[in-house]
Image: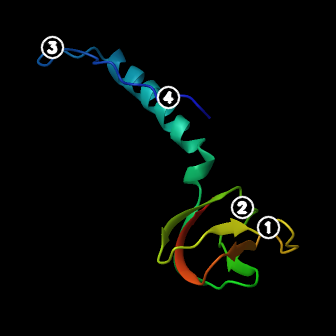
Amino acid sequence: MGTSLEVFEPLYPSGAEVDPSLFARVQDDLRRVISQFASLEILDGQHLTGIDIVSGSTNLINHKLGRNYRGWVVTNIDAAATVHLDETSTAPKSLHLPLVTSATCVVGLWVF
């Protein structure tokens, strides 16, 4: 997305009397910042751990999202292996993430 998250400005100095309109402003600021996080697709995912994948065939990983996956990231791997998407797989994206690996390994995946 390429944008930075907003930084909050101090609303009032410590010990100052609080203006009642301050609370509405705080709510508006929080709503705006939280909506930035809510719109990040990568946060809407599942962390899958202990996934065994074998070399020599396509591994169909049940991603448990209940919708088509948008992307994935390897979070952990226990071998010197490369893992990539099998672009030729006809497995439904709403159910499975089709992965191929250069060596049998156990991985952790963040699927979003």
The residue identified by callout 2 is 69
Q: CA distance from mark 1 to mark 4?
A: 31 Å
**Amino acid type, label 2:** Tyr
Residue 57 makes an appearance in the image = yes
Residue 65 makes an appearance in the image = no
Residue at the extreme left of the image, as rendered: 15
Please name whichever residue, 17 or 39, is drawn nearer the observer in this view of the structure.
39
Q: CA distance from mark 2 to mark 3?
A: 49 Å
Q: Residue at x 51, y 29 (%)?
A: 32
The residue identified by callout 1 is 93
Circle 3 residues within 10 Å: few <14, some 14–19, many ≥20: few
Residue 21, x across and y down, in percent: 36, 16
Q: CA distance from mark 1 to mark 2?
A: 6 Å
The quarter of the rendered structure image containing the C terminus is bottom right
Instruction: Looking at the image, tell me whether mark 4 or mark 2 is earlier in sequence order.
Output: 4
Residue 25, x across and y down, in percent: 40, 20
The residue identified by callout 3 is 16
Instruction: Looking at the image, tell me whether mark 1 or mark 2 is earlier in sequence order.
Output: 2
Please name whichever residue, 58 or 10, is drawn nearer the observer in this view of the structure.
58
Q: Are marks 4 and 3 in contact (CB under 8 Å)?
A: no
Circle 4 residues within 10 Å: few <14, some 14–19, many ≥20: few
Instruction: Looking at the image, tell me whether mark 4 or mark 3 is earlier in sequence order.
Output: 4
Tell me the SS state at disc 4: loop
Residue 4's disc is: 4
Q: CA distance from mark 3 to mark 1?
A: 55 Å
